[in-house]
Image: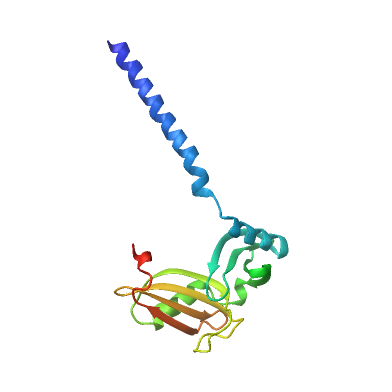
Amino acid sequence: MRRNIVYTSVALALIALSLMVLTVLYLLPKLTSVDAESQSAALTALNGTPMTRATAVSFFTGGALEQTVAGVDQEGQPLFVIVQPGREITTVYARDIESGQAAVQAVMTHLPDVGSVVSHVLGITGPSDGAGAPAAGSLVWEVIARTRPSGFVYAYVDAHSGTILWHFTSSDTFRLWDQ
């Protein structure tokens, strides 16, 4: 009787362990995969600029959809490579611009009712609509933050001076993000 209990316990433990291993093997590629567009932007940055290691790829939506690749050069100096449609490349060293955290702080300090920051990404603005928006080709930090009680603020902060160039607020336009 005792032997049956031991065998059954061992068998159940092996089945549970096998299920855990299979689950990890199934989920790991899905959790660590990178989309093809971000991978292409990172490879463009690594092959066409002084960047030797990419650490992050983010999408900038303040103009034509472009990707910003963050990384370091051979000396370990942080830099950003902006890969625009058509694979036009702009390289910016972090030491030459205000930090993303400074842009976030400017938004938190100067705009009312800003709650938590959703994202901030460096990019180059597209064509302006003339309604006070930054001029085309401006290097800016795009800061997206939640507002109180609900909604979002989109602010564009000059990457060189740290001043807020333009912002707009939505109320419930993007309710999907709140879910």
Please identify the quadrant where the N terminus is shown. top left
Locate residue 127, reporting x and y percent: 58, 82
Judge by depth and name the residue closer to the eye, 108 or 32: 32
Locate residue 178, reporting x and y percent: 34, 65
Judge by depth and name the residue closer to the eye, 119 or 136: 136
Residue 126 higher or lower than 174, as above or below: below
**Can see residue 102?**
no
Locate residue 93, reporting x and y percent: 63, 71
Q: Residue at x 54, y 66 (%)?
A: 59
Q: Is residue 30 left or right of residue 124?
A: left
Residue 158 higher or lower than 68, as above or below: below
How many discs appear? 0
Q: Residue furthest left?
A: 1
Judge by depth and name the residue closer to the eye, 13 or 178: 178
Q: Residue at x 33, y 16 (%)?
A: 6
**Can see residue 148?**
yes
Q: Is residue 30 left or right of residue 72?
A: left
Residue 162 higher or lower than 70, as above or below: below
Q: How is the image coloured?
A: rainbow
Q: Quadrant of residue 65?
A: bottom right
Q: Quadrant of residue 68?
A: bottom right
Q: Residue at x 38, y 65 (%)?
A: 177
Q: Quadrant of residue 64?
A: bottom right
Q: Is residue 44 left or right of residue 23?
A: right
